[in-house]
Amino acid sequence: MNEPVVKSVRVECPIHDAFLTFTARIDLWWPIAHRRFPGSVIVLEPWAGGGFFEKAQDGQEARLGNVVRYEPPHALAYTWYPGAIEKPTLVQVSFVQEPDAVLVTVTHAEGESALGGEWPRRALRFTTNWDIVLPAFAAFLKSEEVA
């Protein structure tokens, strides 16, 4: 098994707010440039077995993955189909309360995809994308503090 992509960000808010923003409010902060359809809505269903999908205004829907673990406010895991060949990769997100912030860590692993020798190339893409997505999450939370 190849090494996963691991990315973290610290956010200054209560742990429950970080978790709920990452999950229930995902459509508000998920970057526009990281969506398949213009003007779409991103939905992450809040339970193990729930779906993770993008809905276009014209009714098209893209399944992004499935929620495999939902443990508020500490852990979330979901499968991720974009960027995989036939079977999904696995994204695990942990939320850890620190003295004055919450450490949010994403671990994006090969999962069921069995990408093998293809994983290093895909991992570079996932690394680049998480370097955009996690700061968008943190920036949204920071803007909510001011609001």
Image (tube, rainbow, N blue to C red):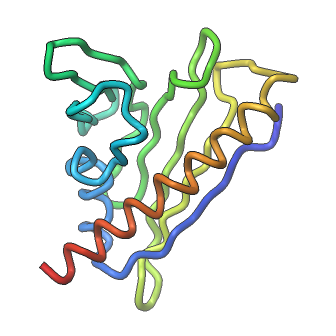
Viewer-side residue, 17 vs 72: 17
54 relative to 96 in the view: left or right: left
Residue 147 to residue 60: above or below = below
Q: Residue at x 78, y 29 (%)?
A: 119
Quarter of the image where one finds residue 122? top right
Query: Residue 20 appears at what percent x and percent y?
Result: 24, 57
Query: Residue 25 appears at what percent x and percent y?
Result: 21, 51
Residue pushed farthest right?
Answer: 117
Viewer-side residue, 52 vs 56: 56
Quarter of the image where one finds residue 137? bottom left
Residue 35 to residue 141: above or below = above
Query: Residue 12 appears at what percent x and percent y?
Result: 36, 82
- Label count reads 0
Q: Residue at x 24, y 74 (%)?
A: 143
17 relative to 96 in the view: left or right: left
- Quadrant the C terminus occupies: bottom left
- Quadrant the N terminus occupies: top right
Q: Residue at x 28, y 36 (%)?
A: 44
Q: Residue at x 63, y 48 (%)?
A: 128
85 relative to 43 in the view: left or right: right
Residue 97 to residue 118: above or below = below
Residue 53 to residue 135: above or below = above
Residue pushed farthest bottom?
Answer: 99
